[in-house]
Image (spheres, rainbow, N blue to C red):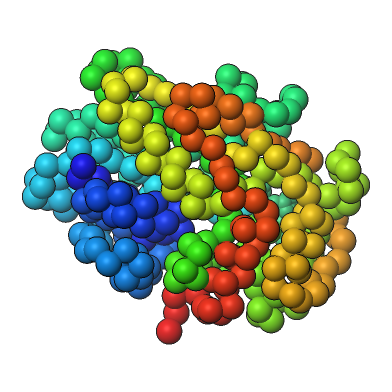
């Protein structure tokens, strides 16, 4: 299959490209590099021993995007491209809506022009907001509390409307829980710009000595140890979820929605301890106030994906920490030389 991957130079996209190439697919990446580096593309090729086609194109620029579709017949699109920092989206909502919504609309329009009707979309557990109960199933009500999250809710609706209007469309909405980890080679991984917002990249930078200590945001939540609980999922498990979703689209299912998570909750302190074990280092931390907007607990019911995609996450917290540590220690400055 010839697959166009938007945002393929980024964190989840790069790991998915590895699986796509190893499965024998032809891969075309479109990325503006606004939050990534071309070095990741080189490393995908190094890991797989295969060539991929890279175009530095911003989805907001319709003409060059049309040219990519014109050049070769594309069978399916996996759409990762987007800005993803929740806090930043609160400060600059217009940039987020423009990049994420308009960029996606341009992509969908170009797909329509060229008769490309199979799409996998990166959604997020953020569309569940603060869920009324746990675990979360796909039929929970959708809500959001920041522009980033609203963008995902809106794009999901746009895609449901698109499927309604065109019964030939096949779309998989994949709601990721908390992606962490790296390729086991240590050659590709998450490379946040500036100080990381997310827990695991932050811990990794403390472990490698770039940051002095972790701030644990609150230990008074109604959870077993008082710290926030999340469903962390290894990025290679996510990558394999995308492969399964592509296979599913080949059966003409229309629009399908799946949680991609492990189904298991892990607290901040459990993650700190697992990372300390993997890195064989103490991770200094300090308990501070709750972070505004955080919820106590969030984890998936991932049984729908298991039943309908024959997909299940297989890597545990220890593998997540070991692979993150291998990437961070081999590349203390990420992809920067
Ligand atoms: P990432 O920032 O590493 O990758 C996104 C890529 O998209 C980057 O390479 C960036 O340069 C590119 N991009 C952004 N805007 C673009 C545009 N207008 N045109 C072309 N390229 C553009 O992020 P990621 O963690 O790999 O996330 C991938 C997708 O998964 C995003 O849509 C994100 O919202 C979603 N998601 C991420 C998480 C997470 O915690 N990482 C969780 C749930 C959902
Ligand atoms: C995890 C836990 C924090 C940092 C975010 C987005 C969500 C999705 C995934 C895209 C929480 C605690 C964190 C730190 C801490 N992204 N923490 N100290 O908030 O669950 O989800 O990323 O769709 O939309 O909101 O992930 O990694 O930031 O936090 O104590 O320095 O770690 O309070 O309990 P979150 P996270």
Q: Nearer the viewer, residue 180 or 262?
A: 262
Instruction: Residue 136: name its quadrant.
Output: top right
Is residue 141 left or right of 132 when viewed as pictured?
left
The quarter of the image holding the N terminus is top left
Q: Nearer the viewer, residue 109 or 302?
A: 302
Q: Position of residue 261 (x, y in %)?
A: 59, 39
**Relative vertical location of residue 277 with respect to residue 224 in this rendering, above or below:** below
**Relative vertical location of residue 44 with respect to residue 156 in this rendering, above or below:** below
Instruction: Residue 285: name its quadrant.
Output: bottom right
Q: Is residue 335 visible?
A: yes
Q: Position of residue 307 (x, y in %)?
A: 51, 24
**Relative vertical location of residue 55 with respect to residue 43 in this rendering, above or below:** above
Query: Residue drawn at (74%, 75%), measured in percent from left and top?
Result: 280
Residue extending furthest bottom?
337
Instruction: Residue 103: name its quadrant.
Output: top left
Query: Residue drawn at (61%, 70%), measured in percent from left and top?
Result: 325
Residue extending furthest left?
71
The quarter of the image holding the C terminus is bottom left
Q: Nearer the viewer, residue 162 or 38?
A: 38
Is residue 332 left or right of 106 when viewed as pictured?
right
Is residue 111 left or right of 132 when viewed as pictured?
left
Query: Residue drawn at (68%, 58%), measured in percent from left and top?
Result: 318
Q: Position of residue 148 (x, y in %)?
A: 53, 43
Count every numbered label the image shows and give the total.
0
Q: Position of residue 108 (x, y in %)?
A: 27, 35
Q: Is residue 128 visible?
A: no
Query: Residue drawn at (42%, 24%), measured in percent from left and top?
Result: 256
């Amino acid at each position: 299959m010839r697959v166009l991957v938007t945002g393929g130079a980024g964190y989840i996209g790069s790991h998915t490209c590895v699986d796509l190439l190893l499965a024998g697919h032809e891969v075309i990446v479109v990325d503006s590099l606004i939050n990534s580096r071309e070095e990741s593309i080189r490393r995908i090729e190094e890991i797989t021993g295969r060539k991929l086609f890279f175009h530095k194109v911003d989805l907001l620029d319709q003409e060059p995007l049309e040219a990519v579709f014109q050049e070769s017949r594309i069978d399916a699109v996996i759409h990762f491209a987007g800005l993803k920092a929740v806090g930043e989206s609160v400060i600059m909502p217009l940039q987020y809506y423009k990049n994420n919504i308009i960029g996606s609309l341009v992509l969908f329009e170009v797909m329509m022009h060229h008769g490309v009707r199979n799409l996998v979309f990166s959604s997020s557990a953020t569309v569940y907001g603060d869920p009324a109960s746990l675990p979360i199933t796909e039929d929970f009500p959708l809500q959001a509390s920041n522009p980033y999250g609203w963008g995902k809710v809106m794009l999901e609706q746009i895609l449901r409307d698109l499927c309604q209007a065109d019964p030939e469309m096949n779309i998989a909405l994949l709601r990721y829980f908390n992606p962490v980890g790296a390729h086991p080679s240590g050659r590709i991984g998450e490379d946040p710009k500036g100080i990381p917002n997310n827990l695991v990249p932050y811990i990794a930078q403390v472990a490698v000595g770039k940051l002095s200590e972790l701030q644990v945001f609150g230990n008074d939540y109604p959870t077993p140890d008082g710290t926030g609980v999340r469903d962390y999922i290894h990025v290679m498990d996510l990558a394999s979820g995308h492969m399964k979703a592509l296979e599913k689209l080949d059966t003409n299912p229309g629009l399908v929605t799946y949680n991609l998570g492990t189904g298991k909750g892990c607290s901040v302190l459990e993650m700190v301890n697992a990372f300390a074990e993997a890195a064989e280092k103490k991770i200094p931390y300090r308990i501070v106030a709750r972070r505004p907007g955080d919820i106590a607990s969030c984890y998936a019911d991932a049984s729908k994906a298991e039943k309908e995609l024959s997909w299940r996450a297989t890597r545990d917290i220890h593998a997540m920490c070991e692979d993150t540590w291998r990437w961070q220690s081999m590349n203390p400055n990420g992809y920067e030389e």
